[in-house]
Image (spheres, grey):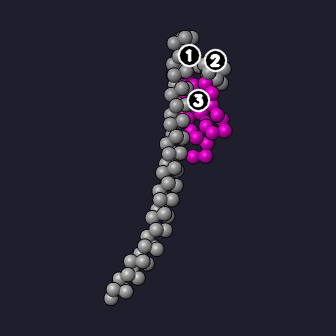
Amino acid sequence: MKRYQEKLRKGMGVLLGPGIFASAVLFLFFAGHRMEETAVQEQEELLRRAVNQAVVSCYAVEGRYPESLEYLEENYGIRVDREEYLVLYEVFADNVKPRFRVRRIGE
């Protein structure tokens, strides 16, 4: 009986070490993936806020809303990484705030 218990403990030790290692690797993988997702969401939100601020600034300075995203890029310093993000910019009239949406390409 004692021999059986000793063998069982040794067997558990042999299995427990790799199991803990595999669990740690999986945890680090999923934690890293989650951090990357959070960073992407924050970048998207920063771009959304920058465009909104530029739209409002344009209206305050010029008395009209910008006619295009390109106008904001040329005159208000907005930079859009067009390989990563798509900005849908809809204008109704120069005295009505444009609607825009920021989307990450590939989502």
**Considering depth in this image, is 103 or 6 the residue closer to the camera?**
6
* Residue linked to disc 3: 89
- Report x, y in % for residue 57: 53, 16
- Which element carries disc 2, helix, strand or loop? helix
* Up-down relation of residue 106 to residue 23 (above or below): above
Is residue 71 toward the left or the right of residue 55 in the image? Answer: right
Q: Residues within 10 Å of mark 1 (few under 14, many from 20)?
A: some
Q: Measured from the top left, where is residue 11 in percent x and y?
A: 43, 78
| Quadrant in the picture for residue 85 | top right
Q: Which residue is mark 2?
A: 75
Q: Which residue is mark 1?
A: 58
**Which image quadrant is residue 76 in?**
top right
Which region shows up in magenta? 78-107
Residues 7 and 36: in front is 7
The secondary structure that dominates the magenta segment is loop
**In the rendered structure, which amino acid carries the disc numbered 3?**
Tyr
Q: CA distance from mark 3 to mark 2?
A: 16 Å
Q: Earlier in the sequence, mark 3 or mark 2?
A: 2
In the displayed image of the protein, which residue is found farthest to the left? Answer: 1
Relative to residue 25, is residue 88 drawn left or right?
A: right
What distance separates the C-alpha of mark 2 from that of mark 1? 9 Å
